[in-house]
Amino acid sequence: MSWSIGIDFGTSRSAGAVGELDPRRLAPDQSGRKVAPIMAPSVAPLEIEGNRWIPSMVLLTPDGQLTVGAAADNLAGVHPDRLERTPKRSLGTPAPLLLGGEPVDARDAAAAVIRSIVAEGRLRHGGDPAGCIITHPVRWAGVRRKALVEAAQRAGLEKVDLVDEPVAAAIHYASEHVEMGAHVGVYDLGGGTF
């Protein structure tokens, strides 16, 4: 089965979920009164490093490799000047990150985080994802959105779509908990956008 990946590249934490088209699932028809066997997506969160999320931090090792997540956090005690805890804040800005005195493009830092999430999806489902959706803050304008797409492309993703973070949350919640025709509201309390 082909699979796609959704990524929440957050300021302090990042997470992923994999969706597959599963013909064995049932989904409601448009009236919402009966179900029929159709190609309904099956979505499951990815577990990375034993959690449903990883720290979004990156660390540039002395040999020039970008390390992410818990590994970056573990090395931070030895190389605190090489750590960036919130690379998302710099995405789409002209200044590079300075890690250990070395300039690092924020798109490369973001790509390292995205790549680690996609690698977990590849490990579980094989091959490359058919598509990718990455969430972003509502207030992000074209420059920051473009930088996020470029980061995903640097992580090896070809087909990338973006969606506002609260829109993604509303779609997911509504797909499982809201009756046809009902309404849902979402408040996005993020680590970097509150």
Image: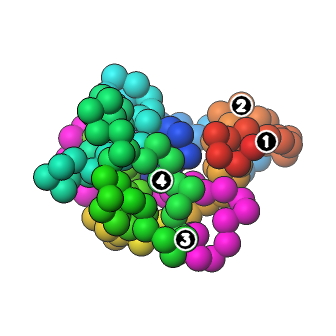
Q: Determine whether label 3 and label 1 are within 8 Å by CB.
A: no
26 displayed left or right of 18? right
Between 30 and 162, the one nearer to me in the picture: 162
Quadrant of the image containing the C terminus: top right
Secondary structure under the numbered disc 3 in the rendered image:
loop
Residue type (three-letter) at the residue carrying disc 2:
His
Task: Residue 96 in the image: state x and y as whole percent.
Answer: 43, 68
Dot 2 corresponds to which residue? 177
Dot 4 corresponds to which residue? 87
Q: Which residues are magenta?
A: 121-145
Residue type (three-letter) at the residue carrying disc 3:
Thr
Residue type (three-letter) at the residue carrying disc 4:
Pro
Secondary structure under the numbered disc 2 in the rendered image:
helix
Query: Given this view, does label 2 or label 3 mark the residue nearer the observer?
Result: 3
Secondary structure under the numbered disc 1 in the rendered image:
loop
**Is residue 141 located in the magenta-colored stretch of the structure?**
yes
Query: Given this view, does label 4 or label 2 mark the residue nearer the observer?
Result: 4
23 displayed left or right of 183? left
Secondary structure under the numbered disc 4 in the rendered image:
helix
Residue under the point 50% across and 47% down: 86
